[in-house]
Amino acid sequence: MHTFGLRGGRAAGALPAVTLLATALLATAVPAAPAAAAPLAPRIDLTVLVVDDGGGAVGAITSELSGSGVPYRTVRLTDPARPVIDAAFLADTVDGRPRAKYQGVVLPDEAPGGLAAAERAALTAYERAYAIPQVDAHTWAHPGVGLDYTSEGGRSGVMDGVRAELTPAGKAGPFRYLDGPVTFEDNDPDIAESYGYAGRPREGFTSYLDVPTEDGGRAGLIGEYARDGRRELVVTFAYNQHQRQFRALARGIVEWLTGGVHLGQNRNYLSVHVDDVFAPDARWDTERNCTPGDFDCADGDGEGTEPIRMTAADAEYAAQWQRSAGFTLDMVYNAGSGEEWKAQNGGSDPLTARLLADRAQYRWVNHTYTHPFLGCVQDTSTVPWTCAKDAYGNTRWMSRAEIAAQIRDNHTWAVNRGIAVDRTELVTGEHSGLRTLPQQPADNPNLAGALADTGVKWIASDNSREPRQRPVGAANTVPRHPVNVYYNVGTAAEMTDEYNWIYTSKEDGGSGVCETDPASTCLDEPLDVTTGYTSYIVPQEARIALGHVIANDPRPHYVHQSNLAEERLLYPVLDKVLADYRALFADNTPLINPRHRDAGTELARRAAWDKALAAGKVTAYRIGTTVTVKAPAGVTAPVTAPEGTRKQQLIGTTAFGTPYAGARSAWTAPDTLQSAVTLTLPTA
């Protein structure tokens, strides 16, 4: 632990302006007291000050604070009405005790041009007086931040594809949750995605992440610079909130900034829902570029086209893969569709028999009995379809009783066969019943009642349409990330053919949708159908999924049973996600695999926490080794603290939280007869 005090020993009349400011700041913060009284330990509020210049680096750090629930206050340098940063802005007294209003400071660089000289001096004095750390979000290598110029044995330039290594100090310190190298993304060889300045450390600089230089030495990209009673975390490469290198390092930046004691917590989540289990899925027609049976596939209804359905061998492989991968899949099942299949195939279904034999190896989620559309009655006479109307012009809806029967019958089937299924969890077919734009702009008004009738508390939604959790009656949505391995393909060639149709221009033989959809990008040229899945689609989808995982995002990912059938297209994607994750993170930071209800609970807690923060109803501070957190009744607080932290009970203490990433963290609330959470930090 580092502690810093004011510098002394100068002759009268020789005090520099910054020291005079520090003295004035302390004089403001500490009331007059009898000479014999010991000075009160300061109160440090658990809030971060962010000085924002509008750049990507500060925005990335802010996104990490926001995403993990760390309270912060932003001062926008471009805002003409922004407050002046002076001693009164930074510190005051509460109940006669000096208070530092911010536990850490984020600046665009070590000397932002948007701050007046007096403001920079006030920040310097404040950081010295209260031992407040400062992050320089993006700067360059020079002696002012403890590094030699890059011309003096360092390196500068495009960082794409560069492999950086954590130093022993980095692994032992704020980045102790990382295990392997941090490789900078290189997603497009024609575009420079990152630029950096790596300099050799000078006295006072402790490098945490560095790269090799041409002469065989090492040059720092991230490190701590200690000088004049202050500490700065210096970052000398450009980044944004979506790049993998930042996402991997973001947790450590916040841990360094807060000394490992802060509100908020961060986990790495991955769960995968396999929809349509027991049901067959339609197959993409590579000649007509549509899926027979879909409303927009005009030539035929799909008769004669072989559907895609797992076999008993596919189910056996899934169970074996889970054991070898150390990962559990969620089987999102349609029992009635399986019963229909059995009836159409002589009353025998080896797939169902195999999955039931292995039922304890999976988690199971209700997907309705026969996968009907639970929203409005669809009029398919036009493309796209519309909601059918009655004679009075009113929308026709699936009834409450029909929806409830679909949910209840599927649940009963599972219970009768010894499958452990939670009635509070539901995934509807195509997320139907919920609003579907543009055709159905509102939820089926019968849906909420049917959910209440069947005890459903957590209903899946599509994150690409509705990324925010919302209530549906007494239930809440759980947004899920779609994985771009399509439901209607069983082979890599089919997958690549459909991918080409969607993501290539009309000139290149595609649909041209990518040319008109602002959210899409066209491929430079069609992928080779024999190699494109492995060489392009798998790395792309694995990168996207891993980005969600390391962004503290608990939302499940969803695929379909067809992706476990035939050429088993899902496994290469998951294998790469898991391999890349385990190569980067240490054993103290395992993947968290939440079930449907747990992901929903996490999102609901975050929403309540963010609302309390926005309303200014959370008070949290540290005095010495004691941390106090007060939140509104019914709101649990996310807190992160070092190993060895204890939580005060009504009588005695208990170990706080659970271990993760080298720290302890938890959602926590006061116990009975307590008005606040009180933690005692370890003394060392």
Image: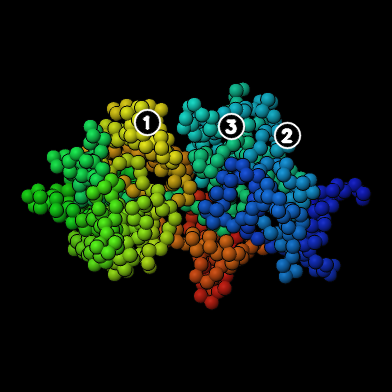
Left or right: residue 330 compared with residue 239: left
Marks 2, 1: nearer the viewer: 1
**10 Å neighbourhood of mark 3: few (<14), some, or many (≥20)?**
some
The outermost residue toward the left is 346
Q: Quadrant of residue 369?
A: bottom left
Q: Which residue is mark 1?
A: 505
Q: Amino acid at mark 1?
A: Ser
The x and y percentages for residue 78 are 68, 47
Q: Give the secondary structure at mark 1.
A: loop
Q: Please tell me the numbered disc located at residue 195.
A: 3
Distance between mark 2 and mark 1 Cα atoms? 51 Å
**Residue nearest the observer in this picture, 290 or 641:** 290
Q: Amino acid at mark 3?
A: Tyr
The x and y percentages for residue 112 are 71, 42
User: Is tag 2's residue or tag 1's residue first in the polypeptide sequence?
Assistant: 2
User: Is tag 3's residue or tag 1's residue first in the polypeptide sequence?
Assistant: 3
Q: Give the secondary structure at mark 3.
A: strand
Give above or below for 137 relative to 605.
Answer: above
Marks 2, 3: nearer the viewer: 3
Q: Residue at x 29, y 28 (%)?
A: 529
Q: Which residue is mark 2?
A: 143
**10 Å neighbourhood of mark 1: few (<14), some, or many (≥20)?**
many
**Residue nearest the observer in this picture, 406 or 569:** 406
Q: Amino acid at mark 2?
A: Pro
